[in-house]
Image (cartoon, rainbow, N blue to C red):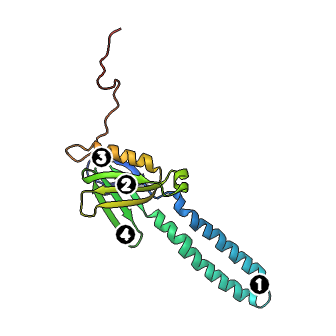
Amino acid sequence: MGYPKHLLAPGEQIDLALRPHWKALILPVLNLVVAVAVFGAAAGLTSGSTQKVAAIGVGAVALIDIIVFTVRPWVIWLNKNYIVTNKRLIIREGFIHREGRDMPLVKINDVSFKHNGLLDRILGCGTLVVESAGEHGQEQLDDIPHVESTQRELTNLISNVGANGTAELAEPEDEPRGKKKTKQ
């Protein structure tokens, strides 16, 4: 899913690029299967002079159903992006009616997550709640895949934001702090 590089500030790098978990597409796919099955059954069961009219009517209803309950949710899912860079959290949603929000990492106060049920726990997805010191306060990001590791990564980036507003991940040390090397 790449985020356009020309929309990034100089020196800004993408750390996480996310879109909602695929579980958001389960009901649209089931709807597609049911709509096609109903259309096939209706077209096959009608006979005689009403067959053509019934097939056109059921086909039109199935097409409308597929557009509204399958294609529309897929387009919404495809056009919802959550990007975490070393400077900010970028939220972009929408295809025609586009909305966006940027949260500088230095303004984020708290990052928490919650699983909204057993299915979320099994799939590892959930809701990420990002609280900022800005005017809009809290932002809920629904159906985030790997929500626990995403929360941990975002928290690490926030804690490593330097004075210039850029997150710099610390390099792992060979020796734990506080221990001195001993000669052998």
Q: Quadrant of residue 173?
A: top left
Q: Residues within 10 Å of mark 3 (few under 14, many from 20)?
A: many
Q: Which mark is residue 83?
A: 2
- Indicate the amino acid at tag 2: Ile
Marks 1/3: CA–CA distance = 63 Å
Q: Taking 43 as reference, is 3 left or right? A: left
SS state under label 2: strand
**Residue at 47% of width from left, 63% of height from top?**
78
Query: Is tag 1's residue or tag 2's residue first in the polypeptide sequence?
Result: 1
Spatial separation of the CA atoms under disc 4 and disc 2:
16 Å
Whether the residues at callouts 4 and 2 have beta carbons within 8 Å, the answer is no
Kindly identify which numbered label has been placed on residue 55: none
- The amino acid beneath tag 1 is Thr
Q: Earlier in the sequence, mark 4 or mark 1?
A: 1
Considering only order in the chain, which callout, 2 or 4, is on the residue closer to the N terminus? 2
| Residue found 44% across the figure and 48% down from its top | 148
Quadrant containing the C terminus is top left
* Distance CA(mark 4)–CA(mark 1): 44 Å
Q: CA distance from mark 3 to mark 2?
A: 14 Å
Q: Which element carries disc 1, helix, strand or loop?
A: loop
Instruction: State the image coordinates of residue 170 (x, y, percent, origin top left).
Output: 31, 36
Going from the N terminus, do you reach mark 4 or mark 3 first? 4
- Which residue is tagged 1? 46
